[in-house]
Every structure is written in structure tokens, then in C-alpha cells.
Image: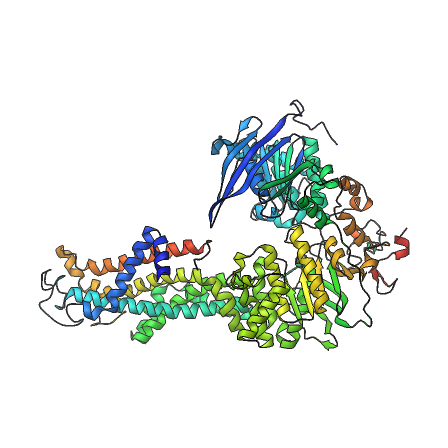
Amino acid sequence: MSNILKIFSSAPWSAKFGMVVILFYAIISIFAPFIAPYGETELLGRAYELWSDKYLLGTDNLGRDMLSRLIYGARNTIGLALSITLIAFVLGSLTGMIAAALGGWVDQILSRIVDVLMSIPSLIFALLILSIFGTAMPYLIGTIAILDATRVFRLARATAMNVAVMDYVEVARLRGEKLGWIIRKEILPNITAPLLAEFGLRFCFVFLFISALSFLGLGIQPPTADWGSMVRDNATLIAFDDITPLLPAGAIALLTVAMNFVVDWMLHKSSGLKDVS
Amino acid sequence: MLVDSNKNSNKEISATLLEVKGLRIEGLSEKGWQEIVCGVDLKLKRGEILGLIGESGAGKSTIGLAAMGFARDGCRITAGEIIFDGIDLRSATENEKRKLRGTRISYVAQSAAAAFNPAHRLLDQFAEGPIDHGVMSRSEAKEKGRALYRSLDLPDPDNIGERWPHQVSGGQLQRMMVAMAMSCGPDLIVFDEPTTALDVTTQIEVLKTIKEIVVDRNVAAIYITHDLAVVAQLADHLMVLRYGNLIEVNSTGQILEAPKQEYTRALLDARTRHEKTTAEIPNPEILLSIDKITAGYGNGPDILQEVSVSVERGRTVAVVGESGSGKSTLARVITGLLPPRSGEIRFQTDLLPAALAQRTKQQLQKTQMIYQLPDVALNPRQHVRDVIGRPLSFYLGLRGKEKERRIIELLEQIELSEKYIDRLPDELSGGEKQRVCIARALAAEPELIVCDEVTSALDTIVAKAILDLLQKLQHELQLTYLFISHDLDTVASIADRVVVLYAGRVAEQGPKSAVFQPPFHPYTRLLLSSVPEMKQGWLEKTLATREAKAGIAREVKITERGCPFAERCPEAIPEICSNERPPIQTPASGHIFACQHSPEVLSK
Ligand SMILES: Nc1ncnc2c1ncn2[C@@H]1O[C@H](COP(=O)(O)OP(=O)(O)OP(=O)(O)O)[C@@H](O)[C@H]1O
Ligand code: SF4
Ligand SMILES: [Mg+2]
């Protein structure tokens, strides 16, 4: 605990701000049912009610409480983004490290597959897949995770390449170590810093991507609350000088900025200085 | 030497050009600011070379930079005066210093390869400095470059500047760097270990260039190195440094003949050759035999051609040769990283599979390897405990207490104490890291250890300690070493048998006494005569020899026909040597010799 505090206090103000914001989002998503005044899909009053004591941020196009949906939206959108990012990372960094460690034709095949996937604009690729297979959750997760895994693959492969040529990896090979050990013990510990930093960035992209898909109607399906579709559903209010639909957009923006602050700091830390242990 | 090019002849020659008084520099470490240079004075006149010598961490480079008015990153100058030709560098502005640095003071770094931009032609890079400082136009600068290349004896001086950095050899690149330092006609040049990364043969060339420049152009120079024999050839005065303190200053002759301080004597001693005497082993057993190995990378040419070497148990076989002669390639073939195109490797009587993947755990265990750069041979994230512990559990199945006990035992064997067990590589010095690498190799309980340039990256004194340790271990554990090195002094002190490799072929091999004593193979003679001796005047004497005139340093070229050494060989027989394979001769017991001449002829 004191260690965490020490790291926290050594961080610059931007990273501190970022960490506080992320913590805030985390608490909200975890405890959403306790924090939210009403249920996620409860129909309460008339559509588009104004801000009041009863409905702090008014109601949406179907008369559901905006604040509650915002809170549940955090849980849904962030939870989904997190799991997609995790899958993308496991997939991408594993294949990236395998490509780097084995080289030769394995590397060739994996790299070409990734090249092909990356050459298709990701939004078009996602629209294509989701309109063929439908927007069920597994397809949504799978499509975005694969798209993101290609980026992670690139990074993992490049950084692992630098490590794989080191003499200590050769020592392990000469000892007769298996691929799994080389990846886990020799390569991975030396590329975790850039991977972690990338994790933050990827998470932001996934998050924005889901919101974008939801906005287009291909993401998280109603009545589940999520920030992207909330912007879309209530967009008409903007014409009446009501800023409510901008709140979910603001929530997205704030988290993205906070995440980037923290990532910047982590990149800076990993770019040379010894780690604090 | 030439005097007409002396552009400073109108200035008073004996005047002091650089004076440093009471210089103190602090460096930032984890424990805050700490003094790394503790009050150093120096004086330098034109036409003089001052040698700064000491181990790493002595503050040599820091002083070298400070002499130009700069503090390296994370350092600050806290006290003292630096006066360059009447200008106080400590109170000069950044701009003034930058201007001085480009035009009147210049710096030559250790690695030319790192200093050049691989994406620009050499002459364009040469011209950048003078153009930036507004001293010359582009065409003038290029003309000047060609003139300098000519005066530095670079091959094809009119066109070599059009090449890219990777198209010239290491020694040539280093000389290009000297040329670049000369571009604006500086008054002071700081050389920071300019030959440390080079072969002995290449080193001579660079030393010659530096010496000529200083004398002909009447500039002053500071020469930083950890090798006394090298600096003895150049410097008029030597400053011995240790941990930022001045140990001894005197004229080069005095330091070599009559060192006053204990530490200076230790430095001298570490560089003096201590020949190992080979004890008789009755009924020697052949541990490793390599038979007619031919190997190469990808679709490239054969880097190794029909190399045969055999290694007796308990002995040290050294493989020597210049950079690019295929020494490391041989190590890769032995360890299985590079399956040969033809030929066999036997361990005792076992035929070893060519590829690593086909070798059994027992076969792998018997051969271990130690590398040149301990920095990259140790995983920065693994503690000493894991580094040494892994082979113990992998090969021997040790766990828990037993493993711990064995790790500590190994640490003691390499003369480190138990407290090192939880350190990360970052927390070890270069020498300590290399010891841990040795312990890792020992942990596997091998019979053969392949050492690839294991001391080249270390300071003289540390290197000597590592060599002593290797010998002690060989004695205690009956180890067999295949010792790869380009440093003949090291080889002389550790080897029983020597294999001289040139362009992937064995030029000669045999007991050390046969190889390092006349009659010499022409290539061995060239190598031996290029090792700097610890006395003044050696450089001039060597440069006057036949070997030097025949071309001391030229690139090692792999040839399909004839003797690969023919182009550089002072004994070469025209027509024959470049076309016909030199016959293999076996003059004395165990001595194998590949040359058109017989040893008897060469001894004359
Ligand atoms: N991985 C590789 N792929 C292709 N060529 C290589 C490779 N490694 C080395 N070579 C070439 O093989 C030749 C011999 O190289 P090697 O590393 O064995 O020389 P060396 O004697 O160990 O030199 P040094 O003293 O510089 O270490 C050189 O011409 C080099 O360019
Ligand atoms: S064969 Fe000819 S070129 Fe080769 S070393 Fe002998 S004399 Fe020199
Ligand atoms: Mg080598």
C-alpha cells in the first residue's frame, strides 16, 4: 500500500489527475447498482424531462433517468472495452512474441495475416463483419478484439524482436529451453512496460470504437445503457440548447484524456529510468 | 614529418593552449550529487598529447568533455577554471562554446559506427560541420575533405567520400572520423578511446594517423584510454586517474620506467604478458573434434571453409584472427545455432547433431557459452539467484534448500559473496556481471566452455582478474575451454593451443609455443607484430617493417581461390598465392601450417 502511495506521490500532476479520474470511473462502474438512483431500463416519466430534483439530469427519449443510465453506461461500456482490450492483448502479444522468438516462416505467415487485416480500414471491417454475422455480443467482442490484436501484435513483435536478439535469449535457447519458457521468462518481463502503456492507449481506442459503433446502431444493443447510443438517442435535444446529450460524450472524452495522461507518464518512466522496486 | 602545413607556425609554440585548475565535477546518482572528479589540474601545449588513463569510472571521459567546457548529462562542474587559449570556458555562453567546439576544439568518440549517420554519404557528413559554422562553402568543404583523406592515407581519397558508412571498414571509418574532427582546423582534439573497438592491425593505422596529425598540424590533443601500451605510443605526458582522483602525472617515459604509485604499477603489470606454461597431460583425451566444417549464413558465401580443430580435455584452445575472420561463426557451429553445410562435430566419440533442436539435454549440458558483452548476456529482469539457479533446476533437478546451497557455493567459486544473490544485473559492475555469467555456465556442470571474447569489453585490470579466475576454475574442475579472442596478449596468457583463423580458413594451428615462436606463418607474424608493446617508439619501428608496408590493415575478404591472405602478405608469391590453395604442411608434432612457403624458408 505504501508502495502505491509512493508511486502516486512521485507522479506528475497530470498523471495524478488521470489516476484519480480512472479510480472514480472504476468505483462508479463497480458500484453502479448502489449509486444509481433508478434502474437501468426503468421507464419513469415523460420523455425528455428537464433537470430537476427528482431526475437530476432529466430523462431520455423513452423517459428513463439520464443519470442512472449514465452510471450504468459506465459499467457497460467500460466493462466491454476492458474485456475486449484484454482479449486483444493476450492474443496480440502472444502471437507477436511467438513471431519474434521463432522467426522464419511462422513470423512470415503471422505478419502477412496482420498486414492484410490492417490494410482494411477498421470501421469498414467491423461494419462488414457485424452486418454479416449480426450484432450479438460474442461477434462484437470478437471483431473488435481481432482488429485491436493486430496493433498489439505489431508492437509486441517489434519490441520482442529487440529482446530476442539478446545474448541472454540465446543462452536460454542453448540451454534447451522450450518456447513457452523463453517467451514467459526471457522476453515478456522485458517488454511489459511498453505493452502496459500500449494497453492504456488501446483501451481508449476500443472504448471510442464501441461508442462509435453504438452511435451507428451496431454496438451494444438497447435497452442496455451505453454512452455511444445515449448520444445518438438524445441528439435531438441539442437543437433545443440542452447539453444533456453531450454528457455521455463528455464522459468518454474525460476518461480518454485521463487514460492518456497516465499512459504518457508510464511511457516516460519505462523509457529509460529504472523501475521502482 | 612535414612542417609546411603548419598553419600555426606564427603562433608561439610553447604557449599553454589549455589550462585546467582545480576541476571538480559532480554527477547525479541515486544517492544524490556525488563528486566524480575531485580536483584535477592539467596543462596542455600545442603539438603535445596528454594521455588520460584509468579504469572505467575513473572520470576520464568526464574530464575530456570538461576540457571542452561541457558537462555530460547528469553532471555539473562545481569548481575550477578551464582556460582555453585565454578564453574562460566556464563563463562562456552556450553559444560561444558551441562555436568553439565546432571550429577550434573537436571530439573523436569511441565508436565511429555510432557517430556516423548511415543514411548519408561520408563526404556530405564531413561537409556539414564547416558549412554549419559558416567557415566554408559546400564545394570548398568537399575539396578540403578530399585533401584530408589523402593526407590520412585513405584508399582512393578522391572517391571514398562518395561511399556510405557501411561500405568502409571499421578502421577506415574511425580515420574518417578523425578527418571530420580536423575539418575546421582545430587547435585541440579530444580522443575518447578511439581504438578500443578495433583490431590490433586496424589500431595501428589509426594511431599513426593521430600521431601525424598532432605533429604535422601542431594541434594539442587529449587521448583517453585504459590501455597503457597504446597511449605510450602517442602521449608526451600521462595522467593516471582513479575514482576521479589524480594518482600520478609524469612524462610517459617516467611512468613506464619508474612508476611512483602502487596503482600505476598494477596497471603496468596487468598489461605485461604472463605466459602460461603448458603442463603435460598423460594420454590426452580428445573432447571436441571438429572435422572439415564448412558453414555460411543463408544463401551467402561459405564463411568457414574446411575448418578442422580438435580440443583436448583440460586444455585451452584459443581461436584468434581479425574481425570478420569467422571466429564467432565457429562458435555458433559448435553450439548448434548455425548448422554447417558440411563436416562433422564430435563430442568425445559422439557425433553431435548439426542443429540445436536435435541435440539432447545431456549434449547441451556439456557445452556452455560465455559472451563478450555481459550487459546483454544477462536478462535485466532476473536476479542473480534465478540466473544461476535455472541451469541447476533445468539440468540437475535441484530445488529448494539444495539449490540455494549450490548457488551460494557457485558464488563463492567465482569470488562473489552470498550478498549478491538478490541483485539485479543493473546493480553489478562489468566484471561482476561477467563473473555471474561464468557461474551460470558452471552451474550446468559442463565439460567444455566456449568463451567468445569474454574479456574484450572489460578494463585491463578487471580482464586480468577474469582470466585468472578462468584458469583457477580450469585447474579445480578440469574444464576445457575454447577461447575466442582477437587479443594476442590474452591468448598468450591463457592458451595451450592456438588456432589462427583468417577469412574462414585455418592459417595455422598448433601448440602455443610453436605458433608464437619463429618460424611464423606470415599472417601470425602480422598479428603479433601489431600488438602494441609497452615502450615508447614501438609504433614508428613497427610502421617501418615490411608487414606494415604490405598493408597492415585491409579488410578481411573471403575468397574462393588461392590463399585469402595473398593481397596483404609480404611473402606472397605472385600468380601462385592468389590462385592456388596453400598446401597444408605438418612440420612439427601437432603443428599444422597452410602456406606456399615451408616453415624453413620463412624462418630466414
Ligand atoms: N547473422 C549473419 N548473417 C550473415 N552474415 C553474417 C552473420 N553473422 C556474421 N556474418 C558474417 O560472417 C563473417 C564472419 O563473422 P564472425 O562474426 O564469425 O567474425 P568474428 O571473427 O567473430 O569477428 P569479430 O572479431 O568482429 O567478432 C563476417 O563476414 C560477417 O559479416
Ligand atoms: S600462401 Fe602465399 S599469400 Fe598465403 S600466407 Fe603463404 S605466402 Fe602468404
Ligand atoms: Mg565475434
Quadrant in which the N terminus of chain B is drawn: top right
Q: Where does residue B48 sit, x and y in percent of width and height?
A: 67, 32
* Residue B542, quarter of picture: top right
> Looking at the image, which residue is at 51% across and 33% down?
B97
From this viewpoint, is residue B502 visible? no
Left or right, A17 with reference to B514: left
Q: Where does residue A49 sit, x and y in percent of width and height?
A: 10, 63
* Residue A264, quarter of picture: bottom left
Q: Looking at the picture, tell me which residue is in the foreground, B449 or B166.
A: B449
Colour scheme in the image? rainbow
Q: Where does residue B524 sit, x and y in percent of width and height?
A: 79, 54
> Looking at the image, which residue is at 32% across and 52% down?
A14
From this viewpoint, is residue B564 visible? yes
Q: Looking at the picture, tell me which residue is in the foreground, B148 or B464.
A: B464
Relative to B4, say whether B511 is above or below: below
Left or right, B554 with reference to B427: right
Q: Looking at the picture, tell me which residue is in the foreground, B132 or B190.
A: B190
Left or right, A86 with reference to B570: left
Q: Where does residue B145 sit, x and y in percent of width and height?
A: 63, 37
Q: Looking at the picture, tell me which residue is in the foreground, B110 or B597.
A: B110
> Looking at the image, which residue is at 26% across and 61% down?
A24
Numbered-mark total? 0
Instruction: State which image quarter holds ligand 1.
Output: bottom right
> Looking at the image, which residue is at 57% across and 55% down?
B429
* Residue B476, quarter of picture: bottom right
